[in-house]
Image (spheres, rainbow, N blue to C red):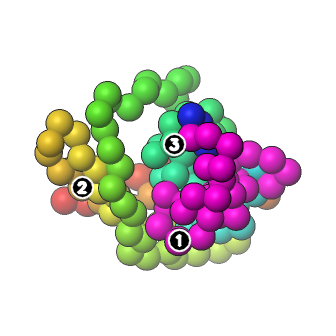
């Protein structure tokens, strides 16, 4: 994990699975299984962890080419991600899925809640984030 020291892979994964990072989202971020999430939910969890760990290249690499931005700006200084709750995962055929989630964060002493229904597509065997709608 970026800037976390050599034993960081043994730390609990930010996605909330309670598994070690290297056995959870770390395997999708780095190494032989990179970009190998088996389901849209696994990909969504790995993307949340990538936001927490500032793995911007992974975020871009897992974004569908039709909707991918040219680059990602760094998160605001002081942003702290607090947790992830997956509310539902719906497979829509072999190549499409929807994941609804809530991600909590804190910035400048204020709590924030991001509730999104995200769309994913499997392209050439790889799950990719397409886009999402915010839920109020």
Percent coordinates x, y for residue 42 in the rendering: 60, 65
Q: CA distance from mark 1 to mark 3?
A: 16 Å
Q: Secondary structure at mark 1?
A: loop
Compare marks 1 and 2 and give the one earlier in the sequence. 1
Percent coordinates x, y for residue 37 in the rendering: 70, 61
Quickly name the residue at label 3. Answer: 53
Residue 29 covered by magenta stretch: yes
Quickly name the residue at label 1. Answer: 17
Q: Residues within 10 Å of mark 2 (few under 14, many from 20)?
A: some
Q: Secondary structure at mark 2?
A: strand
Q: Which residue extends farthest right? A: 32
The one nearer the camera, 49 or 39, is: 49
Q: CA distance from mark 1 to mark 2?
A: 19 Å
Q: Residue at x 29, y 33 (%)?
A: 78
Q: Is residue 11 above or below residue 88?
A: above
Compare marks 3 and 2 and give the one earlier in the sequence. 3
Q: Nearer the viewer, mark 1 or mark 2?
A: 1
Percent coordinates x, y for residue 13 in the rendering: 55, 60
Magenta highlight range: 4-33
Q: Tell me the quarter of the image containing the C terminus.
A: bottom left
The tag on residue 81 is: none
Instruction: State if disc 2 and disc 1 touch (CB < 8 Å).
Output: no
The quarter holding residue 22 reads bottom right
Q: Residue at x 70, y 71 (%)?
A: 94
Residue 130 covered by magenta stretch: no
Quickly name the residue at label 2. Answer: 113
Percent coordinates x, y for residue 11 in the rendering: 57, 58
Compare marks 1 and 3 and give the one earlier in the sequence. 1
The one nearer the camera, 83 or 86, is: 83
Q: Residue at x 72, y 56 (%)?
A: 27
Q: Is residue 90 above or below residue 13?
A: below
Q: CA distance from mark 3 to mark 2?
A: 18 Å
């Amino acid at each position: 994990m970026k800037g976390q020291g050599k034993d960081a892979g043994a730390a609990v994964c930010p996605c909330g699975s309670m598994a070690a990072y290297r056995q959870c989202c770390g395997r999708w971020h780095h190494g032989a299984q990179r970009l190998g999430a088996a389901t849209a939910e696994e990909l969504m969890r790995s993307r949340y962890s990538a936001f927490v760990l500032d793995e911007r290249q992974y975020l871009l690499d897992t974004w569908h080419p039709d909707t991918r931005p040219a680059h990602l700006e760094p998160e605001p200084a002081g942003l702290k991600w607090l947790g992830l709750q997956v509310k539902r995962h719906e497979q829509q055929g072999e190549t499409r899925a929807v994941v609804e989630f809530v991600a909590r964060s804190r910035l400048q002493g204020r709590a924030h809640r991001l509730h999104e229904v995200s769309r994913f597509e499997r392209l050439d065997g790889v799950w990719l984030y397409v886009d999402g709608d915010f839920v109020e």
